[in-house]
Amino acid sequence: MASAVTSAALHHALVVDRQELAPQIVLLGFDAPELVRVTKPGQFVMAMPPSGEVASTALGIYEAEGNRASVMFFVVGKRTAELAALRPGDRIGVYGPLGTGFTIDGARDVAIVAGGVGIASVFLPVQALVHAGARVRLYYGARTSELLVDRERFARAGCDVLVATDDGSVGYAGYVSDLLAQTSETPDLVLACGPTPMLRAVARVAAEMNVPAQLSLEETFACGVGGCWGCVVPLVRTSKQAPSFPPAEQDGSDVVYARVCKEGPVFWAHELRW
């Protein structure tokens, strides 16, 4: 997995653009050249609401090119509502990049599965893979066609886009994991980001295909830097991502608890013990 935890820093960034891609889905771009320089696909930032009255919120880094980075998020509470109220010329504080991202070196045929605003964590992997000459297929699912945001952007980036909607308003009628299961072309790697039920389903499909899968887990982080141990997930002790603390007990369990914000958010599916 690709990690750049030591490159994390606090960036006081200028908001340069804002779009509402669908009802309550906001794309916020900001000037942060140093963040762009060290960001790896799949990492995230802790974004700080301007009032300082509510905690920071973890958001996947959507774009990172030149001087501009961006985040995409669904407005669901006070923290995201404050961020959504920002306009060009305002300031935003972001701490990052944080976490362990995707490992994509050497992949030649990749299926990427995104559910809802999980799409925000997979644009950078798409760009990197296409640049490396890999074939990339994006399986993108949402409740309705209106919530399939920015899909044309992914097509322009050079990947095939297949869509699924719960209500059948466009593309496959049903879950995006079922759309993946129906493919006749087996990839050599699966990447996924989205709600936990979708990730569990994608893990099962990938296992049936006998294909390795990396899952970017969605979680609410209290600190975002691994200090509070409030976002743990069971992981096999033999994983290279297994934390060294607390120390292993002799003849203890073969499962340890890894922090999604620190050891993750990306884990190998076969190493998780949900």
Image (spheres, rainbow, N blue to C red):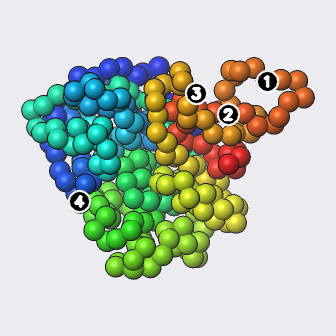
Identify which amino acid the numbered label 3 is placed on: Trp
Q: Position of residue 87 (x, y in %)?
A: 12, 39
Judge by depth and name the residue closer to the eye, 134 or 6.
6
**Residue 180 in the figure: left or right of residue 136:** right
Label 4 element class: loop
For marks 4 and 2 on the same chain, the one whose residue lies earlier in the sequence: 4
**Residue 134 in the figure: left or right of residue 18:** right
**Residue 62 in the figure: left or right of residue 114:** left
Identify which amino acid the numbered label 4 is placed on: Pro
| Separation of residues labelled 4 and 3 (CA atoms) | 34 Å
Q: Residues within 10 Å of mark 4 (few under 14, many from 20)?
A: few
Identify which amino acid the numbered label 2 is placed on: Tyr
| Separation of residues labelled 2 and 3 (CA atoms) | 9 Å
Name the residue that disc number 1 marks. Answer: 248
| Separation of residues labelled 1 and 3 (CA atoms) | 17 Å
Depth check, mark 4 against mark 1: the one in front is 4
Identify which amino acid the numbered label 1 is placed on: Ala
- Work out which residue is located at the far left of the displayed protein and give it: 89
Q: Is residue 52 above or below residue 127?
A: above
x 43%, y 73%: residue:
166
Q: Residues within 10 Å of mark 1 (few under 14, many from 20)?
A: some
Disc tally is 4
Q: Residues within 10 Å of mark 2 (few under 14, many from 20)?
A: many
Image disc number at residue 229: 3
Name the residue that disc number 2 marks. Answer: 257
Label 1 element class: loop
| Separation of residues labelled 1 and 2 (CA atoms) | 11 Å
| Separation of residues labelled 4 and 1 (CA atoms) | 47 Å
Q: Is residue 206 visible?
A: no
Image disc number at residue 59: none
Name the residue that disc number 4 marks. Answer: 23
Asked whether the residues under the numbered discs 2 and 3 touch, taking CB atoms below 8 Å apart as contact, a structural biologist would say yes
